[in-house]
Amino acid sequence: MSINIGYFQEFIGEIAALSAAFLWAAASIIYSRLGLKISPLQLNVYKGIIAIALLVITLIGQKATFDNIALYPLLMLSVSGAIGIGLGDTAYFAALNILGARRTLLLETLSPPIGALLALIFMSEQLSSSAWCGIILTLGGIVWVISERTPIATKKSIKMKAGIIYAILAAVAQAFGAVISRFALLQSDISPLTSALVRLLAGTAIVWLLWLVTNRRQTGLTRSLLIKSNLSITNWSAVAIAAFSGTYLGIWLQQTSLKYAPTGIAQTLLATSPLFVLPIVAFMGEKISWRSVLGVFISLGGVAFLFINVN
């Protein structure tokens, strides 16, 4: 039986988006564990440096050239990385430390609706009635899950609120980053791999600057230029694995999906990480209620409904 490769190539953007969603779900589990030992800023810098090194090696292996990259798309991708990766991922890691991977990824489904609302506000793109229904469904599913009362949630209600705020900030930043990145990709012939490197460089630089500002008074400028850590070899291995799968491959696949699939379809499929994380955390022993499962499907149904008219 022969396999029709051309059929899969037709859906390369959609396949890339689903693959990225799975890798982000797996990496989020690792990051949530690492968050117990390292700050969000440091974790963001570490995974950024590792992923940048991998991207540079890959581009060198492909003998890529950067002569034909226009300045404007380069600037837009840098802004996208600074907002989406630098600020967004830092807030995301902070949310992971408090809420865990399952709840944080669920809140990340807010990113597509937020992106649609941003387009409405800044670009005057009108939303259809189905889009508004999608936004309401997404919000309803999230509120239903987050409002579920458990003994742990009751004891940590203050921290839960902080985690929700961080997750919402991450969703907003990532929505801004995705919209700007999509615009830059459409305005140039830059490859997804190169655009991923540009975004990561800008995002990691912003995080490093934030780390310097927060630590300069305590350690002095000279010592604060280096980020020190007492992580064990095992933890460093975990950082490397998560950076390779969730950042290096994840962002590469994300950029591929944004270049080859319509924005709405790409964002919808990229938001399916909560579906992948459910069986993972269940296998690890976390108790998942039917309310949580149903809430995830409601939210993802809302995301799909938001872009139901996208061709």
Image: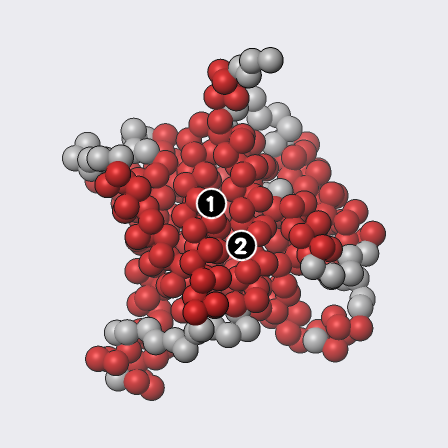
Q: Amino acid at mark 1?
A: Gly
Residue at 22 percent of width and 35 percent of height: 63
Q: Nearer the viewer, residue 127 or 167?
A: 167
Q: Nearer the viewer, residue 94 or 29?
A: 29
Q: Residues within 10 Å of mark 2 (few under 14, many from 20)?
A: many
Task: State which quadrant residue 229 falls in.
Answer: bottom left
State the separation of the CA atoms marked 1 and 2: 9 Å
Answer whether labels 1 and 2 touch (C-beta < 8 Å). Answer: yes
Identify the residue at the far right of this view. Answer: 290
The mark tally for this picture is 2
**Which numbered disc flags the more N-terminal residue, 1 or 2?**
2
Residue assigned mark 2: 27
Q: Is residue 136 visible?
A: no
Q: Quadrant of the C terminus?
A: top right
Q: Residues within 10 Å of mark 1 (few under 14, many from 20)?
A: many
Q: Amino acid at mark 2?
A: Ala
Q: Is residue 11 left or right of residue 279?
A: left
Residue at 69 percent of width and 59 percent of height: 284
Residue 292's spot in the image, x, y percent? Answer: 77, 53
Identify the residue at the far front of this view. Answer: 1
Colouring mode (rainbow / by chain / secondary structure / one colour): secondary structure
Residue at 64 percent of width and 65 percent of height: 99
Q: Which mark is residue 250?
A: 1
Q: Is residue 270 visible?
A: yes
Q: Please, is residue 139 above or below residue 285 in the view?
A: above
Residue 35's spot in the image, x, y percent? Answer: 53, 69
Q: Secondary structure at mark 2?
A: helix
